[in-house]
Amino acid sequence: MKKQILFICCAVIAYCLSACNTAPQQAPLKEKNLPKHVILIGFDGLSAHCLNNGADMPTFRKMMAEGASTLENRSILPSSSACNWASMFMGAGPELHGYTEWGSRTPELPSRVVNSDNRFPNIFGLYRDKAPEAEIGYIYEWEGMNYLVDTLAMSFRKHAPMSAENPNGCTLVAVQYIKEKKPNLCAIIYDQPDGTGHGKGWSSPEYFAMVNHLDSCLTQVMDAVREAGIMDDTVVILTADHGGIETGHGGKTMNEMQTPIVFYGKNVKKGFKIPESTMVYDIAGTIACLLDVPQPQVWIARPILSAFEDN
């Protein structure tokens, strides 16, 4: 009898511990609350550390205050560019998609699953399969971004690097595209402040000046969304691939590993701090949920549904 009682007690304790360590199941978003437009704006090398330590970024901060956010999103390892952007688009880590380095152009490991275009499933291709008539745009500054997406899925694709002659980088292209085409899915990926971090340091005055310049670019993009008349039916996502420390990244410090995520727009909770742990690949899962795209089995992404009102 004592053994039976002891067994029952152990079972109850084990169940309670399991329940405490299990994330609550989140219901899918209601169809009426799904947006018609999702715009992902990424900033290469924008660290959560800079936002925690004095970066002004008034538009970015306003969107945080009026949306749902976390400054504790984590990159995959290594905390480098291509492998993290790939994870953000592909809903999985490098162990599955195979892109393992800062400048990966093809998988260094065989992708666990490939689609008809011989690519690991990514959000752009999956959405194209679901919505053949959708307007999908991809605007980027770093040339290496071209190798991380299903280019055949794009309605519009433009490489528009930042330079002395073009200090706003891909901003003007993005503004014109949004106003003219009102995309259903659009990714706008800046190559800064990563370059300034490498050149001057992630805590340098020049780095903080660059993030404030990027905030002015963000303001222009958001103005375009409003002028296009789609803001009420849009979710905007702000994020980054990795942070940095001193003049580098790729390592395991939290300055390198932690990045922001901000959700802003339709059905997003206002002033909400996302409590659960998030990873860079969860962004793909969240976009898939917002666009009602079934998530492939090989993805490990967890949609960040707590950020939205009907969950």
Image (spheres, grey):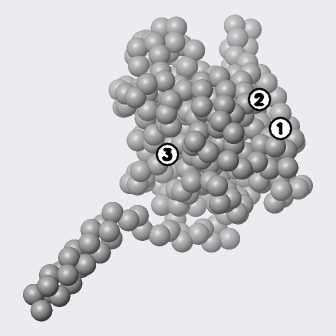
- Checking the image for residue 151, the label placed there is 1
Task: Write the residue at 74% across / 8% down.
Answer: 165
Residue type at mark 2 is Asn
Q: Quadrant of residue 83?
A: top right
Q: CA distance from mark 2 to mark 1?
A: 7 Å
Seen in the image, is 59 located left or right of residue 4? right
Residue type at mark 3 is Met
Point out residue 200 in the picture as x, y percentages from the top left corner: 48, 8
Whether pointer 2 and pointer 1 mark residues with C-beta atoms closer than 8 Å, the reply is yes
What is the quadrant of the N terminus in the image? Answer: bottom left
Q: CA distance from mark 3 to mark 2?
A: 22 Å
Asked whether residue 248 is in view, the answer is: yes
Q: In this figure, what is the number of numbered marks?
A: 3
Q: Quadrant of residue 43?
A: top right
Disc nearer the start of the sequence (3/2): 2
Element assignment for label 3: loop
Tell me the crowding category of disc 3: few under 14, some 14 to 19, or many 20 or more residues within 10 angstroms, Cα based. Answer: many
Asked whether residue 230 is in view, the answer is: no
Element assignment for label 2: helix
Disc nearer the start of the sequence (3/1): 1
Residue of label 2: 146
Image: 57 above or below 303: above
Image: 166 above or below 135: above
Point out residue 274 in the picture as x, y percentages from the top left corner: 42, 52
Q: Residue furthest right?
A: 133
Tell me the crowding category of disc 1: few under 14, some 14 to 19, or many 20 or more residues within 10 angstroms, Cα based. Answer: some
- Checking the image for residue 279, the label placed there is 3
